[in-house]
Structures are given as C-alpha cells and as structure tokens.
Image (cartoon, rainbow, N blue to C red):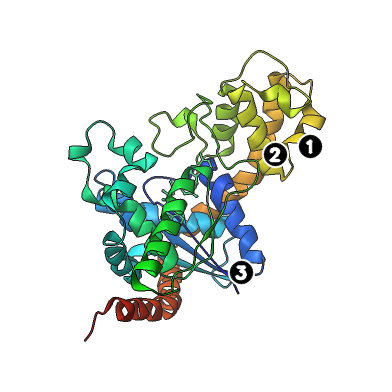
C-alpha cells in the first residue's frame, strides 16, 4: 500500500489554516487505502526562534491532542513526535550532504523567515528543507498532503531523492507526490486577504485558533475584513476581492462543498448575512474539536503513551530504511 507522511510544527497553536489545509485531508486519507504516518516536527519547531522547553513540550502535546480530536485515530495511523524517531535526523545528515547550498538558498520560506538578516538565522533554519525531505523519505512515503505553502519544499524533496539515487546509482528513494487539494489550500489572514493565516502572526484577530471558543470564533468572523459589495453568484465575481474570496473558501472547505456550489447558494447576500452563517458553520465544526482537545490535554500521560507507541511502530519502518541507506553510502561497522 502507498504510504502517506505529513507533519506540522509545534511552534505555536493550531490554526484553521492548518486544519483546513492539512489535517482535514490527513483524516480523509487515513480512511482511504493508504498507510498513514503523521508527525509533530519538534526538531523543525526550534529552527526559527528560541522556544522555551515548557512551551515546546506543551505545544507538542497540544498538537497531538489536535490531531486526535480532529479524527486521527492512533489505531489507524502512526502518530509520532519527530525527535523520538532518531532516523529522521540521521537521514537528514546524509541529505545535508546531497542538497546544494544554492537549492536551499532559493527556498522562499528561508528567504521570508531569515529576512534581511540571514547572518543571524540558525543553521537549522537553512537546513530545514533537508530535514523535511528526510521526514518523508525515511518512510519511503509516496504521498504528502500539505497546504500550498509547502509546494516548493516538496519539489526540493524530489530533487534530493533524485540526486541521491543518481549519485549512488540506485533506485532507492521514491519520487513523492504532493497532495494539495480542495478549496482551502491557502487560508488567508482574516485581517488581510493578501497574507497567509499563520500561527506566528502577531495579531490574534488574524486567525482562528483550534482552541478558540465559540464566542471568539464568532467575533473574529464578524470582524473579518471584507469589502462593501454583495457576494457574487459566480467565481469570476471574486476576482480582485481576496478577503471575500477567503471567507467563501473557508465556508466551502468547512462545509465540504466547492466554491461554485457555495456561491450558487449565497450569491447576492451581503456580508451582514453571510458572516453569521459562516460563524455558525465554523462553530458547529470546530467547537467539538476544541472541546475534545481540552479533554485530552487533561490527560497528558495518555498522549505520551500514544506517542511512545507511535515511535515504536515508526521505527519498525525507519530503522531498516536507514540501515539500507548507510549500506548504499558505504557506512560500515
Ligand atoms: P506548518 O507547521 O507551517 O504547517 C502545517 C501544515 O498546515 C498547512 N498550512 C496551511 N494550509 C492552508 N492555509 C494556511 N494558512 C496554512 N498554514 C499552514 C501547511 O501547508 C502544512 O501542510 N514544513 C512543514 C512541516 C513539515 C512537513 C514535513 C510537512 C516538516 N516535515 C514533511 C510535510 C512533510 C511546515 O512548516 O508546516
């Protein structure tokens, strides 16, 4: 069976962007004919800025709770924390020696995150995409569900696999397929339709957090930036209206409809009518998840037990692939 791998950073709380762009698809792939591995990438979470240890540990458990509350079933999927499966970091070293500085320097996320002061960025931030390639390829995963912002990293993953295979004259690492599908592959900020919704945005009003309660969700949607026009009944009418487009995309993804279908129903409505409907839909879908997350967070030992079992299952896959990689490279002993 083809294998799915994907990961999320425990660098902050989960957002609606993570849920609609990634987790919702993880859950559906878990129910399809795939073997599924989902990961909290704590090694990645320390690349950008210093995270105090308590926060990292809290975020990791909360993210695990978010996965489970959203429908990831530890009996059907392998759920792990990256640092606990050491083969990820071990393969990443090999890939650090396969990937070229030039490739890494062209990554837009590196350029965005390092900003003007690349000298002050961590070495880990630069090498980030090689570790991501290792996350995927240490499972020989073939399908990687992600949001649109990870597309370039997945192309690099293919380049790394191809160069390794070519340099060593093997056909060992698969060329992975990105799975970037649905109405919400790029959820935008509620305050600025030209910016991605992000856990690192300083404005909490810009995002819906998966831990927000019903009042907070409704309030953020009510205050979301829009334009004065009514909603169009066709997609073309959303052109040049990024804030409107974003709210319609969110509605479509939450309600599992296409944007066309949504507009057929809501075309002609003012935002004064549409926003309360969107808020009601969002609360009905998200409140049960945040309630379940809170329940799970009250039992951190149970979360740790699930992750420990996940690591054991994962290492049955990763240890032989690392061993074979070392053999290919000529590492003996
Ligand atoms: P991260 O933690 O930034 O985001 C996790 C997932 O959520 C998606 N996402 C979004 N989708 C739609 N709209 C948004 N506003 C939005 N914000 C985030 C991301 O595309 C991603 O799918 N590098 C990865 C983590 C990673 C990984 C991997 C992913 C590490 N190793 C291996 C796949 C495979 C990241 O930073 O995701």
Tag 1 near tag 2, CB within 8 Å:
yes
Image quarter hosting the N terminus: bottom right
Is residue 212 visible in the rendered structure shown here? yes
Element carrying mark 2? helix
Labels 1 and 2: the sequence-earlier one: 2
Residue 307: name its quadrant: bottom left
Left or right: where 286 falls relative to 312: right
At label 1, counting other C-alpha atoms closer than 10 Å, the crowd grade (few under 14, some 14-19, many 20 or more) is some
Residue under pointer 1? 261
Front: mark 3 or 2: 3
Q: Are marks 1 and 3 in contact (CB under 8 Å)?
A: no
Q: Which residue is mark 3?
A: 34
Q: Give the residue at x 29% y 69%.
A: 90
Describe the element under mark 1 as helix, strand or loop: helix
What residue sits 33% from the left and 78% below the top? Answer: 328
| Rendering coords of residue 63 (x, y %) | 45, 54
Q: Is residue 140 left or right of residue 227?
A: left
The secondary structure type at the circle numbered 3 is: loop
Gap between marks 3 and 2, in whole Å? Answer: 25 Å
Q: Quadrant of residue 297?
A: bottom left
């Amino acid at each position: 069976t083809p294998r799915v791998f994907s990961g999320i950073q425990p660098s902050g709380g989960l957002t609606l962007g993570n849920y609609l762009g990634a987790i919702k698809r993880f859950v559906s792939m878990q129910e399809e004919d795939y073997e599924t591995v989902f990961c909290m990438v704590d090694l990645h979470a320390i690349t950008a800025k210093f995270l105090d240890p308590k926060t990292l540990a809290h975020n990791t458990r909360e993210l695990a709770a978010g996965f489970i509350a959203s429908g990831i079933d530890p009996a059907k999927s392998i759920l792990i924390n990256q640092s606990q499966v050491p083969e990820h970091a071990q393969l990443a070293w090999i890939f650090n020696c396969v990937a070229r500085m030039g490739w890494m320097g062209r990554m837009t996320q590196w350029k965005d995150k390092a900003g003007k002061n690349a000298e002050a960025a961590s070495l880990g931030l630069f090498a980030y995409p090689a570790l991501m390639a290792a996350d995927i390829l240490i499972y020989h995963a073939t399908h990687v569900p992600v949001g649109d912002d990870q597309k370039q990293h997945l192309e690099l993953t293919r380049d790394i696999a191809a160069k390794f295979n070519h340099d060593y004259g093997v056909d060992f690492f698969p060329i992975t397929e990105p799975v970037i599908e649905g109405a919400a592959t790029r959820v935008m900020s509620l305050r600025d339709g030209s910016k991605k919704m992000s856990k690192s945005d300083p404005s909490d009003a810009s995002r819906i957090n998966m831990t927000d309660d019903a009042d907070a969700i409704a309030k953020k949607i009510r205050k979301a930036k829009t334009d004065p026009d009514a909603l169009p009944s066709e997609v073309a009418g959303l052109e040049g209206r990024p804030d409107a487009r974003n709210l319609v995309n969110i509605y479509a993804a939450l309600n599992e409809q296409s944007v066309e279908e949504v507009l057929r129903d809501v075309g002609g409505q003012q935002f004064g009518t549409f926003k309360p409907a969107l808020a009601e839909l969002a609360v009905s879908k998200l409140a049960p998840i945040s309630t379940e997350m809170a329940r799970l967070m009250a039992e951190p030992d149970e979360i740790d037990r699930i992750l420990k079992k996940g690591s054991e299952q994962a290492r049955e896959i990763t240890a032989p692939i690392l061993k074979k990689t070392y053999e290919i490279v000529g590492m003996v002993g």
